[in-house]
Image (cartoon, rainbow, N blue to C red):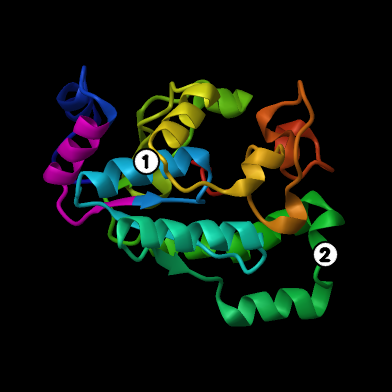
Amino acid sequence: MNNISLSSLNAAIEGKSEIESLAILADLFPGEVVFSTSLGYEDQVITDFILKNNLNITIFTLDTGRLFSETYMTLQKTNNRYDTKIKVYYPQTAAAEELVSTKGPLSFYDSVENRKECCFIRKVEPLNRALKGAKIWVTGIRAEQSGNRQGMERLEVYEAHDLIKFHPILDWSFEEVKHYVKSNGIPYNPLHDKGFVSIGCAPCTRAIQEGEDFRAGRWWWEDESKKECGLHAK
């Protein structure tokens, strides 16, 4: 990081709205604030914050090569709505080809290790490239999404990339997110209307049933404690 400490940043955004906080960070770190979107409800809220207010924050997404067609449609509609071009990062071709050639297209079902390997190639490595040179990484994480996210702070140090992560809607409820999206006419992934809460790769995501955890639809064949892909690992 630079000479601005985490405590100083917390003081700078204390009592400020989500949009005001994003604007402050964008001013403090011009050209060094990035936002990663998966085009789900939460990320569409933050995209609206950024683009409607012309904030100096770069928006990018990770195309794993295994996304739902509805996700691509949401990307197109978002670009059209805001007259923008969200930057897209893809997996390294050679690594993806090697994985599928040696282990097959569905190796992630066989073990947690295989699934994490696939996530690394398709998500983590592209993310590492996307974060290069950034000082602030904005995310759409919410505390109620999973147990291991409930102890997070809105600002936290991400040592793996020597940057600070900012979760502007960390304390929002799912209902608040949906209300914001629909009351503002923001494009959203139609899979949300079919019971999909957290939307990732098509082979690894399903709709959840009433009463299930928010992350139950992601890697549903695995233990609850292992349901992270590595994107937000310290």
Cα distance in 3D space between marks 1 and 2 = 33 Å
Q: How many marks?
A: 2
Find the magenta span and give its range.
Answer: 19-34
The structure residue drawn at horizontal position 18% and vertical position 45%, both measured from the top left corner, is 26
Is residue 44 found left or right of 194 in the rendered image? left
Q: Secondary structure at mark 1?
A: helix
**Rendering coords of residue 197 (x, y %):** 64, 37
Q: Main secondary structure of the magenta part?
A: helix
Q: Nearer the viewer, residue 205 or 91?
A: 205
Q: Secondary structure at mark 2?
A: loop
Q: Dot 2: few (<14), some (14–19), or many (≥20) neighbours within 10 Å?
A: some
Q: Which residue is mark 2?
A: 106
Q: Nearer the viewer, residue 228 or 218?
A: 218
Q: Quadrant of residue 63?
A: bottom right
* 145 shown above or below 197: above
Q: Which residue is mark 1?
A: 46
